[in-house]
Amino acid sequence: MIDDHYDRQLETVMTNVVDDAVEIYEPLNAKISAILNSSNDFDTAQQSIAQLDTKEFQEAFSIHILNALELGNALGRSIITKKDESLSGENSVAAKDESLEWFVCADGPVSISFNIIPKAALEYLQQKSLQLAGVESEAVKAAVKAKIEEAIKSGQTVSDFRKEIDSMFDSLGITKLSKQHIDLVYRMNTFAAYSIGQANQVADMIDRFPLAYFSPIHDSRSRHIPLEGYYPSDIVPLSPIDYNCRCGIRYVHVSQITGNEVPFYSAVPRPDLVKFDQRNS
């Protein structure tokens, strides 16, 4: 199925960007480690870290996350145009696919068109990547500061603290030994870009994709089973709707409608479950 194929491509993209992103953190980690190793007291270390210039990190981070966001968004838009092409055989969206490219991932090629992303969407992705970069660099510094304050409260000496620098970064999830933090940042945002890309493309083709099915994972970790069902395409909740959400959205083409697909909801149910409103974020 087209949906499964593109979902696998998205998973490959997210895995690749997470792996590549680990190296972006190393220069910032090195600077913080150097400050901690050269400081004679905690106050000096805190002041130096607070003044740490992270422009290099922010630039590298923003470029990398922007690439991930653009690629996720392009994949999301491309799956909709590809489904319509395959299911309807009509040519009304042909103009948007003039420069269709083949993007090769682990399980083979997938068609993807970058030229179908509107200028406004690209500007939004650019702004989001820069914002994330600034927030991320401050978050890293704040996390290290919190560890220093914790060491002060526990009566730890600077010398003892130096011995725990590597494990401190591991606990923050920002080194090669521990990728949880990076994984969360990149996967969440790339997945969100993919969902928004699909939704925006569907909005331009609402007559072709009037319905959407919100499909949660059915296992012990699932939190969103109450949201499962058919929706009008323009109100379906967009994944991820909270941290580590793994739910999917299947847009139903007019040629796939049997007449039994009755929307259970005319508005988003259980709004308390939807932590992130991707349509307005």
Image (cartoon, helix red, strand yellow):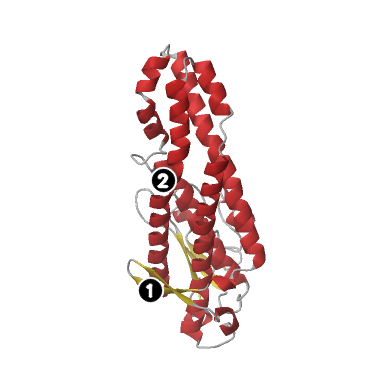
* Residue 222 shows in the view: no
For this view, does 215 lie left or right of residue 136? left
Q: How crowded is mark 1: few (under 14 residues within 10 Å), some or many (20 or more)?
A: some
Q: Which of 128 and 212 is in front in this view?
A: 128
Q: Name the residue under label 2.
A: 23
Q: Residue 16 carries which label?
A: none
- Residue at the spot 53% in from the left edge and 80% down from the top edge: 254
* Residue 170 shows in the view: yes
Q: Residue flagged by tag 2: what amino acid is it?
A: Glu
- Residue at the spot 56% in from the left edge and 47% down from the top edge: 59
> In the rendered image, which quarter is residue 105 located in?
bottom left
Q: How far apart are marks 2 and 1 (CA)?
A: 27 Å
Q: How crowded is mark 2: few (under 14 residues within 10 Å), some or many (20 or more)?
A: some
- Label 2 close to label 1 by CB (< 8 Å): no
Q: Position of residue 139 (x, y in %)?
A: 53, 36
Q: Which numbered disc flags the more N-terminal residue, 2 or 1?
A: 2
Q: What element carries label 1?
A: strand
Q: Mark 1 points at which residue?
A: 109
- Count the labels in the image: 2
Q: Position of residue 164 (x, y in %)?
A: 36, 24
For this view, does 141 lie left or right of residue 107? right
Q: What element carries label 2?
A: helix
